[in-house]
Image (cartoon, helix red, strand yellow):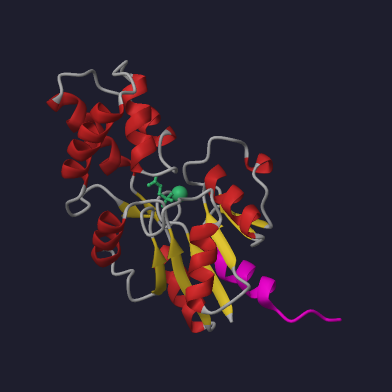
Amino acid sequence: MKAVIFDLDGTLIDSAPDLHIAANGMLRDEGLPKITFEQTRSFIGKGVGVLVSQVMQAVGAGNDPEEHARLLGRFMDRYEGEPKNTVFYPGVVDALARLEAMGCTLALCTNKPEEPTRIALRHFDLDRYMKVVASGDTLPVKKPDPAPLLHVMRELGTDGALYIGDSEVDAQTAQAAAVPFVLYTEGYRKSPDEQLPHAHAFDHWDKLPDIVAAHFAPSEA
Ligand SMILES: O=C(O)COP(=O)(O)O
Ligand SMILES: [Mg+2]
């Protein structure tokens, strides 16, 4: 099986604008100061719980667990609707269609919680491509733990795959799962691309089908 598993935020879709609007809306409700777009962007990748902790830390709102749970609830109330300012990265839909036509089996492994993942997949008509979906709360652990990625592979019934993602968390997850990692360089990573262990990298989705084809091509030997 040619299994290709994708990250969501920063890889297929640029969701940072909606996450930023939800974060600043929550802060405004609480009478707390705003954060910058760059701050929000840098807080994406480890799930909404970590994002809200980092927002609280950035505005000096402490780290009390009850306060965190309350603010997370307020954040989710604002985030969970239809995405309004989230867009595909250029070329994603064509690339997914080409991969499918090449006989690849596609799946998703994201740290975004199940409900907003479901809404985003439906909104962007991505659910038709993804045979298996693991979200941030599908298992008790999230990426960079390898369990969610291994879970997707088990559900697909394969022991080999490629993982496509944009961040340090995705690179670590793939490494821990012993799955080759393909880095999309235009997402939310904070380190230079050479510091993220990867088998291949691409900066435009037009380039991914050839990378996948070469990876799964039978070797000459
Ligand atoms: O919810 C997040 O923090 C990131 O989600 P991702 O795993 O799709 O990048
Ligand atoms: Mg990501």
Q: Based on the displayed image, in which of its 4 quarters is residue 123 positioned?
A: bottom left
The residue shown at (43%, 63%) is 92
Position of 53 with respect to 75 (left or right) is right
Q: Where does the image place residue 107, in percent across and percent down from the top left? A: 45, 70
Q: Where does the image place residue 118, in percent across and percent down from the top left? A: 27, 62
Is 219 colored magenta in this rendering? yes
Taking depth in this image into account, of 109 and 88 the one nearest to the observer is 109
The residue shown at (20%, 26%) is 27
Is 36 colored magenta in this rendering? no
Position of 99 with respect to 175 (left or right) is left
Given the current orientation, which residue lies at the most extreme top position? Answer: 60
Residue 105 visible in the shown view = no
The residue shown at (37%, 59%) is 138
Taking depth in this image into account, of 84 and 127 the one nearest to the observer is 127
The residue shown at (45%, 51%) is 141
Q: Is residue 128 above or below residue 77?
A: below
Q: Where does the image place residue 217, in percent across and percent down from the top left? A: 70, 79
Q: Is residue 186 above or below residue 161?
A: above
Position of 75 with respect to 129 (left or right) is left
Q: Main secondary structure of the magenta part?
A: helix
Q: Where does the image place residue 194, in percent across and percent down from the top left? A: 68, 42
Residue 194 visible in the shown view = yes
Q: Quadrant of the C terminus?
A: bottom right
Taking depth in this image into account, of 98 and 52 the one nearest to the observer is 52
Q: Is residue 193 above or below residue 25?
A: below
Position of 137 with respect to 215 (left or right) is left
Q: Quadrant of the N terminus?
A: bottom right
Q: Which residues are magenta?
A: 207-221
